[in-house]
């Protein structure tokens, strides 16, 4: 199949893997695709788009120093800390639209696993032990969804068939598509009724340790905290204290610190289920990140502004 010539100057795009290059498919002949895992100096002095490796911003962004880059396209939704790492003058876009569905799947999966003791049954399976228990359902639970962006909305959509009562909370109160979204200032009133709290907020100073001792103390006994946002949302010491006393349960895809070190209390406390930051790490990612990168290439070629710009620009 022949490539289509657009007649505009060449675009130079770097991607970190051969796999992503292949997933992009056929590109116009004015696009030069460079495989650059950012493990060495830049192979060009100019790029129109650079896609860094997944989950490695802290290690690679310094390699963009002195390189002319039109757009840095991240592969994660979260971008807390990127502003401190990104060389001055560069524009950064996050991967909104790529991970929402996969992360929402995991959030609901963690809720089911924790409520129905699936983690404990997995241990019983390995031991050849038959130990039935009468568990809490997900149905009829009062779920407080803290964060109502892309991931939060995807979680809400997937929870709806489970016949739960959802209360959405975000930074500010609003009515969005018929959903009454509460502001964070209403949390003291809302927390005492919440049986399950699902965290989907981004990291950063505004949300640092939002889930602290006072937050946890306001929840009823036996409440479940699910975190698929950022580990920094939760005061880990306060969480350990409440879990150790049997007041709170937790299902965590993200932690602070991360990775969770060997011997940390959260590994061994009853009532804690941990997954190693894999919310977006599913087969849904590859076609979706390719679709986003391709859309950015097409927009740049057409002289249109890029999608999802969160820094610079």
Image: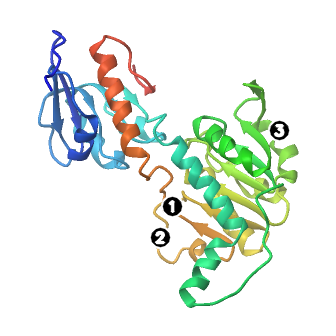
Residue carrying label 1: 257
Q: Residue at x 49, y 57 (%)?
A: 277
Residue lying furthest front: 1
Q: Quadrant of residue 18?
A: top left
Q: Residue at x 72, y 74 (%)?
A: 244
Residue carrying label 2: 261
Task: Tell me the CA gap for discs 2 and 1.
Answer: 8 Å
On the picture, is 85 further left or further right than 308? left
Task: Tell me the CA gap for discs 3 and 2.
Answer: 35 Å
Callout 3 secondary element = helix
The answer to whether the residue labelled 3 contacts the one labelled 1, judged by CB atoms less than 8 Å apart, is no
- Where residue 202 sits: x, y (%)? 57, 41
Between residue 297 and residue 130, name the one nearer to us: 130
**Callout 2: few (<14), some (14-19), or many (20+) C-alpha neighbours within 10 Å?**
few
The answer to whether the residue labelled 2 contacts the one labelled 1, judged by CB atoms less than 8 Å apart, is yes
Q: Residue at x 67, y 77 (%)?
A: 270
Q: Quadrant of residue 214?
A: bottom right
156 shown above or below 10? below
130 shown above or below 26? below
Callout 1 secondary element = loop
- Count the marks: 3
227 shown above or below 289? below
Mark with earlier residue (3, 2): 3
* Residue 173 image label: none
Callout 2 secondary element = loop
Residue carrying label 3: 186
- Where residue 61 sits: x, y (%)? 30, 40
Where does the C terminus fall, quadrant-wise? top left
Between residue 299 and residue 60, name the one nearer to us: 299
**Callout 3: few (<14), some (14-19), or many (20+) C-alpha neighbours within 10 Å?**
few
């Amino acid at each position: 199949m022949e490539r289509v010539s657009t007649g505009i100057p060449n675009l130079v795009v770097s991607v970190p893997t051969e796999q992503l290059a292949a997933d992009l498919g056929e590109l116009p002949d004015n696009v030069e695709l460079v495989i650059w895992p950012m493990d060495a100096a830049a192979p060009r002095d100019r790029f129109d788009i650079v896609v860094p490796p997944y989950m490695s911003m802290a290690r690679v962004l310094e390699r963009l120093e002195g390189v002319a880059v039109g757009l840095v396209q991240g592969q994660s939704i979260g971008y807390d800390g990127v502003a401190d790492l990104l060389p001055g003058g560069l524009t950064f876009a996050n991967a909104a639209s790529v991970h929402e569905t996969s992360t929402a799947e995991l959030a609901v999966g963690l809720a089911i696993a924790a409520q129905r003791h699936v983690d404990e049954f997995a241990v019983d399976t390995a031991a050849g032990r038959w130990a039935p228990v009468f568990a809490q359902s997900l149905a009829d639970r009062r779920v407080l969804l803290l964060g109502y962006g892309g991931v939060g909305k995807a979680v809400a959509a997937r929870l709806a068939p489970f016949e739960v009562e959802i209360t959405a909370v975000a930074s500010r109160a609003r009515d969005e598509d018929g959903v009454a979204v509460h502001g964070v200032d209403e949390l003291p009133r809302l927390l005492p009724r919440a049986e399950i709290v699902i965290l989907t907020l981004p990291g950063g100073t505004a949300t640092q340790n939002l889930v602290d001792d006072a937050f946890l103390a306001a929840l009823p006994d036996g409440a479940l905290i699910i975190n698929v946002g950022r580990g920094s949302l939760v005061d880990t010491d306060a969480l350990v204290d409440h879990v150790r006393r049997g007041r709170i349960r937790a299902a965590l895809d993200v932690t602070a610190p991360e990775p969770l070190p060997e011997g940390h209390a959260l590994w061994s406390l009853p009532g804690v289920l941990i997954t190693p930051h894999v919310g977006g790490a599913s087969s849904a990612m590859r076609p979706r990140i390719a679709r986003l990168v391709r859309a950015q290439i097409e927009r740049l070629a057409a002289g249109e502004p890029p999608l999802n710009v969160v820094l610079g620009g």
